[in-house]
Amino acid sequence: MRATSLASSPSPAALERSPSVLGGAMIIGGTIVGAGMFSLPVVMSGLWFYGSVAVLVFAWFCTLHSGLMILEANLNYHEGASFSTITRDLLGRTWNRINGLSIVFVLYTLTYAYISASGSVIHHTLQSMGVSLSPRAGGLGFTVLVAFIVWLSTSAVSRMTTVVFGAKILAFFLTFGGLLGHVQPATLFDLNSGTTSYWPYLLVTLPFCLTSFGFHGNVPSLMKHFGKDPKRIRACLLGGTLIALGLYLVWMLCSMGNIEREAFKGIAQRGGNIDVLISALGSRLDSANVDLLLNFFSNFAVACSFLGVTLGLFDYLADVLGFDDRPMGRLRTAAATFLPPMLCGFLWPEGFIHAIGFAGLAATLWAVITPALLARASRKRFGSPLYRVWGGTPMIALVLFFGVICAVAHLLFNLDLLPVWR
């Protein structure tokens, strides 16, 4: 695919549409802040609070800039061009096949993870109301609803995500406002455990942090939505990721300030799924209201991430498979997007934590390493006429280093060569 001729300003069509930057930021923030955040206190409990804050800020910085590097390269191609088009043209067919497999693996894995998470959350919520529904049925029913919204259009996803994300923010502060009032300094700073062994658990957290800042599949979707308008798309990425970082830090403060470090071992041994963590927080606070708000928040958290991740997968598959944007073409794309992970969700409904972890390995390639290589190749060929990420070659090197160290950490973890707090 050849690069199209470039304009120095947004296209008239983009100006006519004039979509909201807030809506774009909600897509990014909603994609990031979802079910994955519930895995963070569990996998980062060994590192504990101070270390978790440092690692989350570093992961945010690197993943934000890798997303901006995708934007830099994507602006040299037509609106709607996805990773497949850009990677094939800049890095060659072989790298594109490898990268394409990693994209499909990550987005399908995350979609499966959110099917598993939504089933768990819906089951727990309805159970608290005296209604019995299996996690399988809850997850599959919710997936059908998400598939319908994604099938409609990117605008429908944007509007729905804005509404759901707004409700999620409200639920977040109502929920964690109550949790903040119960934070115990001795628990938060781990004063009673008598241990100073935290940093050995650093490497195991990196792949989960990378996955928890996963929004990169939505960058081509935003260009399709906004047109070639780097300032507005950059504002969406910056705003959405900063919201996510802030919410993550508050979440770590609330969870680690209310549950002792030693207690996270039991949570991990029980699978670390969302309902287990919610039950642990509810039992610590002994508050029916807080438990209800946690359920309310977790439902919206899963919905936001589910919409954002599947939108990225939908647009990628439409580009790769050549399906058009008419209703029947979108129906074919929706079937390719949702049916495989729905089958996995039906067969293995309890795979949330494992799925998030495996997604972190492949995400290092397409969400961090490939964007850095794309930015370097794009600058050599096009000279970045519309937008260039600051920092030059050192920034590319930093992003590459982050990707490589995450991949190594995940491999060592799967070989049982890293210490894990459990």
Image (cartoon, rainbow, N blue to C red):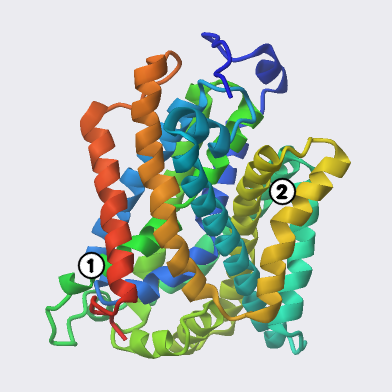
Q: Which class describes the residues within 10 Å of circle 2: few (<14), some (14-19), or many (20+)?
A: many
Identified by mark 1, the residue type is Leu
Quadrant position of residue 7: top right
Q: Is residue 22 above or below residue 14?
A: below
- For label 2, the SS is helix
Of badges 1 and 2, the one in the foreground is: 1
Residue under numbered circle 2: 160
- For the point 51% across and 20% down, which residue is it? 76
Marking on residue 202: 1
Q: Is residue 254 above or below residue 318?
A: below
- Could you tell me if residue 71 is visible in this image? yes
Left or right of 205 in this view: 137: right
- For label 1, the SS is helix
Left or right of 1 in this view: 91: left
Left or right of 91 in this view: 2: right
Q: Nearer the viewer, residue 363 or 302?
A: 363
Residue most toward the right?
328
Residue most toward the front?
94
Residue 351: image location, x then y, percent: 55, 77
- For the point 61% across and 37% down, which residue is it? 221
Identified by mark 2, the residue type is Met
| Mark positioned earlier in the residue sequence (1 or 2) | 2
Marking on residue 123: none
